[in-house]
């Protein structure tokens, strides 16, 4: 599977000279710089580390193992290939990679608990409960747990970007194996054969009831470095003071956190895509992930744009396919974007070339990239805020 990705054609056009990108093919960074020049700028991490794992709170090797688990669960072959290369550089051999996929008893209990949370938060963010976080808190500080939750969300975002854009694997990567046939045939304990179903409320009234319940919950973590409300603009963001609850938590994460705040803001506030459509995409993603804090946050922004709570619910809970044949071109375009957003949110591996081609009937490549980016950003924010258990607004 990883080798076959080397011959794949990226789903978004790339026009830069071949010698300008790693290995002569389109890679993740190159595509982001082309299509998201103002939406994904970040600080340079330490040499040899990615921005998603350059954090003093969580060990690089451990973080990369979690990235591999997220990518395996999402079946993101591009990210799997990259994480295998990184793990090899830090001394993880094939036996170690096999254990990561099939036998977690080879690892210490803190790692096993973190790996289990990584898989669950990736596949079923709506099922995360107090017990899942308590299991981590027995081995890690609140600061460490907060960083782990952010990283899992960040990796889910990266998977959705690389999978949806169809980035090919670099040709120089070697995925040959020296494992025995018995080892190669061991069933994975990470991969999922089918997408995990979401459990939506059966009516608008039931949904409002669950949203009201979420307002009464108490956050599961109390990090020592949480940035206070009305704080000064976070370094590298140069934006408005940090006020929102999730932004205060993100800004408290060393190195990666402040950049994540700015990137999340820019995903919604900059670019070529209509801002109201971005908010609808973000709400639909939060609805699918049952991320109650994010639903309430986006509802407030949609309300300011003239969208009622009932309209937002009907849009997210409705059958978007049946609306696609309506005559109004603006509505057809919007529903096409929302159908795609739902698919990418719930089961990213199911996105195919035809999905991007269908979006191309309504949107430019730059707008398509932003649609993907908004869904990816939502995947991070939904998982981060829901696992922390932030109360709805």
Image: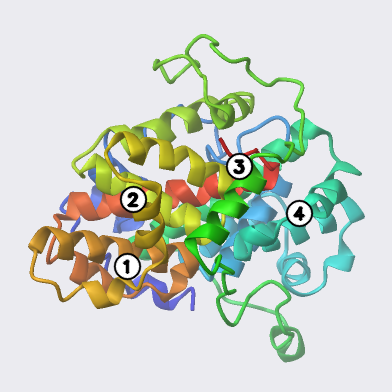
Q: Secondary structure at mark 3?
A: helix
Q: In the image, is 341 to the left or to the right of 331?
A: right
How far separated are the C-alphas under marks 1 and 4? 28 Å
Q: Is residue 44 visible?
A: no
The residue pinned by badge 4 equals 129
| Rendered image: mark on residue 280 | 2
Do the numbered discs 1 and 4 sit on residues whose CB atoms are within 8 Å?
A: no
Q: Secondary structure at mark 1?
A: helix
**Residue 178 or residue 290, whichever sits in front:** 290
Query: In the shown orientation, is residue 151 left or right of residue 333?
Result: right
Residue found at x 71% / y 90%: 181
Residue depicted at x 48% and y 38%? 297
Q: Residue at x 8, y 70 (%)?
A: 327
Label of residue 385 in the image: 3
Q: Nearer the viewer, residue 64 or 119?
A: 119
Frontmost residue, 147 versus 202? 202
Residue 353 position in % (x across, y down): 27, 74
Q: Which image quarter: residue 96?
A: bottom right
Image quadrant in which the C terminus is located: top right
For the residue labelled by badge 2, is the local secondary structure a helix, a strand or a loop? helix
The percent coordinates of residue 82 (x first, y second) are 52, 57
Alpha-carbon span between mark 2 and mark 3: 18 Å
Q: On screen, 257 above or below 117?
A: above
Position of 328 with respect to 38 (left or right) is left
Q: Which residue is mark 1?
A: 339
Write the residue at 43% across / 28% down.
Answer: 262
Q: Position of residue 189 (x, y in %)?
A: 73, 75
Choose the circle earlier in sequence order: 1 or 3.
1
From this viewpoint, is residue 175 visible?
yes
Which badge, 2 or 4, comes first in the chain's sequence?
Answer: 4
- Residue 181's disc is none
């Amino acid at each position: 599977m990883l080798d076959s990705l080397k011959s794949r054609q990226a789903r978004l056009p790339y026009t830069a000279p071949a010698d300008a990108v790693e290995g002569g093919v389109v890679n993740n960074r190159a595509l982001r710089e082309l299509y998201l020049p103002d939406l994904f700028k970040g600080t340079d991490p330490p040499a040899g580390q990615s921005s998603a794992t350059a954090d003093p709170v969580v060990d690089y090797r451990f973080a990369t193992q979690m990235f591999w688990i997220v990518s395996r669960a999402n079946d993101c072959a591009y990210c799997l290939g990259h994480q295998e290369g990184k793990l090899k550089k830090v001394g993880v051999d094939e036996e170690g990679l096999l254990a990561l996929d099939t036998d977690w008893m080879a690892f210490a209990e803190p790692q096993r608990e973190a790996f289990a949370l990584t898989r669950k938060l990736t596949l079923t963010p709506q099922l995360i409960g107090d017990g899942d976080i308590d299991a981590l808190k027995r081995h890690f500080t609140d600061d460490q747990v907060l960083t782990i939750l952010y990283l899992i969300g960040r990796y889910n975002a990266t998977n959705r970007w690389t999978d949806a854009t169809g980035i090919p694997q670099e040709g120089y990567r070697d995925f040959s194996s020296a494992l025995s046939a018995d080892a190669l045939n061991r069933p994975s304990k990470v991969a999922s054969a089918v997408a995990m179903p979401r459990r939506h409320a059966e009516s608008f009234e039931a949904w409002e009831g669950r949203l009201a319940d979420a307002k009464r919950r108490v956050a599961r973590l109390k990090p020592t470095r949480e940035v206070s409300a009305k704080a000064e603009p976070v370094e590298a963001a140069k934006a408005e003071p940090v006020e929102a609850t999730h932004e205060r938590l993100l800004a408290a994460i060393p190195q990666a956190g402040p950049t994540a705040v700015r990137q999340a803001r820019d995903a919604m506030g900059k670019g070529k895509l209509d801002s109201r459509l971005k908010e609808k995409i973000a709400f639909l993603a939060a609805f699918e992930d049952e991320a109650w804090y994010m639903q309430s946050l986006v509802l407030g922004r949609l309300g300011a744009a003239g969208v009622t709570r009932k309209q937002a619910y009907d849009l997210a809970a409705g059958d978007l396919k049946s609306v696609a044949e309506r005559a109004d071109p603006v509505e057809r375009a919007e529903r096409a974007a929302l159908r795609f957003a739902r698919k990418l949110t719930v089961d990213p591996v199911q996105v195919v070339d035809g999905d991007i081609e269908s979006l191309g009937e309504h949107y430019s490549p730059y707008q398509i990239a932003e649609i993907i980016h908004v869904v990816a950003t939502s995947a991070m924010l939904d998982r981060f805020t829901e696992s922390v258990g932030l109360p709805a607004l």
